[in-house]
Image (cartoon, rainbow, N blue to C red):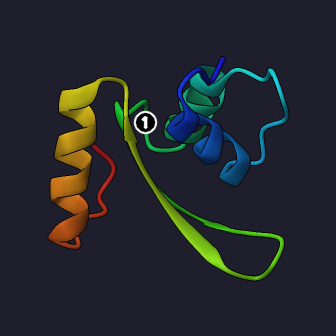
Amino acid sequence: MCIRDSNKLVAEVMGLGEGEDCVAKFNEEVAACGGSTQLIQEYELANGKKALVIAGLNADDTREAARRAMKNDFRCM
């Protein structure tokens, strides 16, 4: 489940409902990338705006994904 407020926002952006499992959704999203531990994904919101989610399975993965995103490196990793 999504526990922290930031994860609740990401859950909303990813289209998860209350109580749905963020980790399962993360794993589903990265499975398309060969089972990566990092997610850099753009989502379109209901209002037409876009959100960029940068996430990892742990803090180091998240920092690495953010570093890659800042360098426009969106390869599956």
Q: Is residue 56 above or below residue 51?
A: above
Report the front residue among 27 and 5.
Answer: 5
Question: Dividing the picture into quarters, in which one does residue 42 lie?
Answer: bottom right
Q: Is residue 27 above or below residue 29?
A: above
Which residue bears the numbered disc 1?
A: 34
Query: Is 8 left or right of 31, judged from the image as shown?
Result: right
Specify the quadrant that holds the C terminus. top left
Q: Position of residue 34 (x, y in %)?
A: 43, 36
Query: Is 4 left or right of 9, judged from the image as shown?
Result: left
Q: Which residue is situated farthest in the bottom direction here?
A: 48
Q: For the point 39% across and 42% down, which residue is it? A: 55
Q: Secondary structure at mark 1?
A: loop
Q: Position of residue 8 (x, y in %)?
A: 64, 37
Report the front residue among 58 and 18.
Answer: 18
Please state which amino acid type lies under the numbered disc 1.
Gly
Q: How many marks?
A: 1
Q: For the point 24% across and 28% down, which residue is it? A: 59
Q: For the point 62% across and 24% down, which residue is it? A: 2
Query: Is 67 left or right of 41, judged from the image as shown?
Result: left
Q: Residues within 10 Å of mark 1 (few under 14, many from 20)?
A: few
Report the front residue among 28 and 13.
Answer: 13
Q: For the point 81% across and 78% down, which residue is it? A: 47
